[in-house]
Image: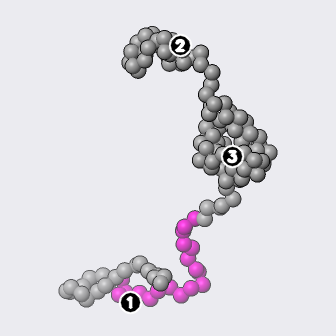
Amino acid sequence: MKAHRAEFPLRAMCRVLGLSPSGYYDWLKRPASDRARRDAQLEARIGAIWTGSGETYGRPRIHATLRAEGERVGQKRVGRLMRGLGIEGATRRRFKTATTKRDTEARPAPDLVRRDFSASGPDELWVADINIRLRI
């Protein structure tokens, strides 16, 4: 609501959201909750661990580091705070292209129909270019 006060009157926003203006002002004066304060501390610690790792540690390693330091925190909370900070771990995996490269030394498949794809009736000529390997 604070960000939109220049566009809309406060009373109108409160009416649309089903709030009272006095409740909004009371909420503004309240101190941060215990969880919000704890999240702020954890965010600072997570940022320090991530920076200290050369910006490579992801959620599992940061969580393990926090646990080793004696912090009681869940992996999902660490992940949520990392997303909020916009940080993520570096991946080592290299993505391989799935394109098959032809072996130039291999003998090509024989052309059994000699490029004549016409048939005088059903079940006389079968043509396919799919090679299926079954793994059992």
Which amino acid does the dot numbered 2 rest on?
Answer: Tyr
For the residues labelled 2 and 3, say whether their Cβ atoms are less than 8 Å apart.
Answer: no
Q: Residue furthest left?
A: 121
Which amino acid does the dot numbered 1 rest on?
Answer: Leu
Residue occupying image coordinates x 38% and y 89%: 112
Asked if residue 124 lies left or right of residue 85, the reply is: left
Q: Residue furthest right?
A: 52
In the image, is residue 15 above or below residue 109?
A: above
Neighbourhood count class around disc 1 (C-alpha, 10 Å): few under 14, some 14–19, many 20 upward: few
* Color scheme of the displayed model: one colour
Please state which of the two labelled residues, at mark 2 or mark 3, is closer to the viewer. Answer: 3
Q: What span is in magenta? A: 97-115
Alpha-carbon span between mark 1 and mark 2: 84 Å
For the residues labelled 3 and 1, say whether their Cβ atoms are less than 8 Å apart.
Answer: no
Between 116 and 128, the one lying in front of the other is 128
Q: Which residue is mark 2?
A: 25
In the image, is residue 66 above or below residue 115?
A: above
